[in-house]
Image (tube, helix red, strand yellow):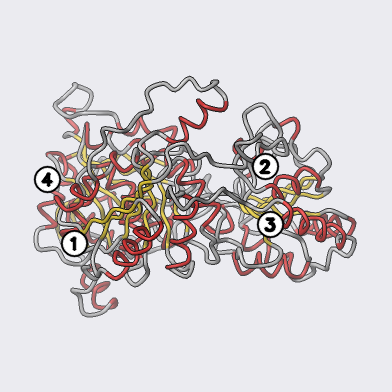
Amino acid sequence: MATQGATLRSKQELIEKMSKPEVITGSEILLRSLVLEGVECVFGYPGGAVLYIYDAMHGFNDFHHILTRHEQGAIHAADGYARASGKVGVCIATSGPGATNLVTGIATAYMDSVPLVVITGNVVQSAMGTDAFQEADIVGITMPITKHSYLVRNAEDLPRVIHEAFHIANTGRKGPVLIDIPKDVSAAKTLFKPATEEVTMRGYNPTVSPKKQQVDKMLKAIEEAERPLILAGGGVVYSGAHEELLEFATKSGIPVVTTLLGLGGFPSGNDLWVGMPGMHGAYASNKAIQDSDLLINIGARFDDRVTMKLDGFAPKAKIVHIDIDPAEIGKNVPTDIPIVGDVKTVLQTANQEVRPASKAGAWREQITAWKTQFPLSYVDSDVELKPQWVIEMLHETTNGEAIVTTDVGQHQMWAAQYYKFNQPRSFVTSGGLGTMGFGFPSAIGAQMANPDRVVVSINGDGGMQMCAQELAICSINNIPVKVAIINNQVLGMVRQWQEIIYDNRYSHIDLAGSPDFVKLAEAYGVKGFRASNKEEAREAWEAALRHPGPAVVEFVVRKGENVYPMVTQGNTIDEMILGDAE
């Protein structure tokens, strides 16, 4: 695997080289500005409107460029890079179809608050608005799904725009920022003046520090509560507040449930961890929310897959909501104690004075009893390979220390349930948008960000076919992602819904004509394995882990397996189907 940023002498020499004022093209300004922002890896796909940019990349070795096989692969890889590293992910695409192929990835990042800088080319300014070849108003198209957008009119504006874009993407509630660069701007020459000053923008000043009186209200509510519970979301991970959350929970003695995007933000091995809540949440997690008298939401959106039937959600609880985005507070669930601020800063403030929830002893015992009585479970088999067993085996063989990315569907929920995460930024998945095709490219980005860690990409046989062409870049660049395909020959989650909700009326879900994934992997020069029982599964997976490069393991699992627990739409989260017998 290529080492990022390995071709230059030192960071200081690089900064001095990139900061040299001279007359250069807009394309060269763009590349220099990216390096000055600390960019080490860019994912992209060239085309006519960005050819000046790619021409400037010829012989440019100051960041690593990965040529993906589809623009959607590029933006999902940049997304995975950002989620797994905490840095801003960067991708580049050309105008028209190149730019529009990024739209799904932009929406994915926007829904999950992932910092990206998305660079697109456009036709020359004189042709804009004329329906020129490969012209699309990408700024207009993506306005609802970007945090901010720029259409750059002058090359001399590029240093400022890029500097601002990185600031906006990675501060406040993080998200994607689009920079659209017409071809004449990337070609124009001007004096390069690097933007290094602190960014100040009128109208953009996220609240980081909370109001002390609101934190005090929360602390008083904790002292009075008999059944307090923490709901920790992706904001804990994105703000780097995992240590502060552990301290807060330990000092207060309050149990913790973590959302899908919050997994890893609180160690699963801790006695206070209850599980994941929601549609496929653990029994104890859902019961705890419904019976709590104080629910402290830390960096979660009260997403509908967590709350399910809103008017029956946490009916006995006083609600505290901590979020850096004030628009989220009270949006879905009425809030009694709103706290606007960065999660890490809020918890640092609270940890100075938080005291034990002294009335909650019986509550903790009750939650432990629920966990013991109703654990996550499945009926194992010595004949068929069960997907839950596969996930447990992946956890065991990686010691729970891998970065796991998933696609979307049943395998995603099984990964969330049965792979236990103890570190933040170890679980990369599309939560809000639920984007099929996300899993494998995001693993490539995660691996580029963490070259020394094991990265496991868990995919279904459906989603894998939306991005399988990216196997080429793993092979060419020796990116050692380990791909686990949970192959049940069907669109599993759709089949489950059709079984349970649509009275077994199965419609257009059969994937039996899928390719031989082992041969497909080998066609790209990637090692491939297949397993259909436990012995084969363990042998194949351990061989994949030993292999120094990328590897694909196809696990042929039971077709009719369902994800449980399950809460169907229209029900409250404590109205769970616990298994097939119900």
Q: Earlier in the sequence, mark 2 or mark 3?
A: 3
Report how far apart the C-alphas of labels 1 and 3 lie in the structure: 41 Å
* Residue 419 image position (x, y, % from top left): 51, 58
Q: Residue at x 18, y 48 (%)?
A: 519
* Residue nearest the observer in this picture, 259 or 11: 259
Tag 1: Cα neighbours inside 10 Å, few (<14), some, or many (≥20)? some
Camera-side mark, 4 or 1: 1
Element type where label 1 sits in the image: helix
- Residue occupied by mark 4: 51
- Residue occupied by mark 2: 329
- Residue occupied by mark 3: 274
Camera-side mark, 2 or 3: 3
Q: Earlier in the sequence, mark 2 or mark 1?
A: 2
Q: Earlier in the sequence, mark 4 or mark 1?
A: 4
Q: Residue at x 71, y 33 (%)?
A: 572
* Residue nearest the observer in this picture, 187 or 179: 179
* Residue 33 image position (x, y, % from top left): 27, 59
Q: Earlier in the sequence, mark 3 or mark 4?
A: 4
Q: Earlier in the sequence, mark 4 or mark 2?
A: 4
- Residue occupied by mark 1: 477
Camera-side mark, 2 or 1: 1
- Residue type at mark 4: give it: Leu
* Residue 520 image position (x, y, % from top left): 19, 47
Can residue 165 be seen by looking at this rendering?
no
381 lies left or right of 283: left
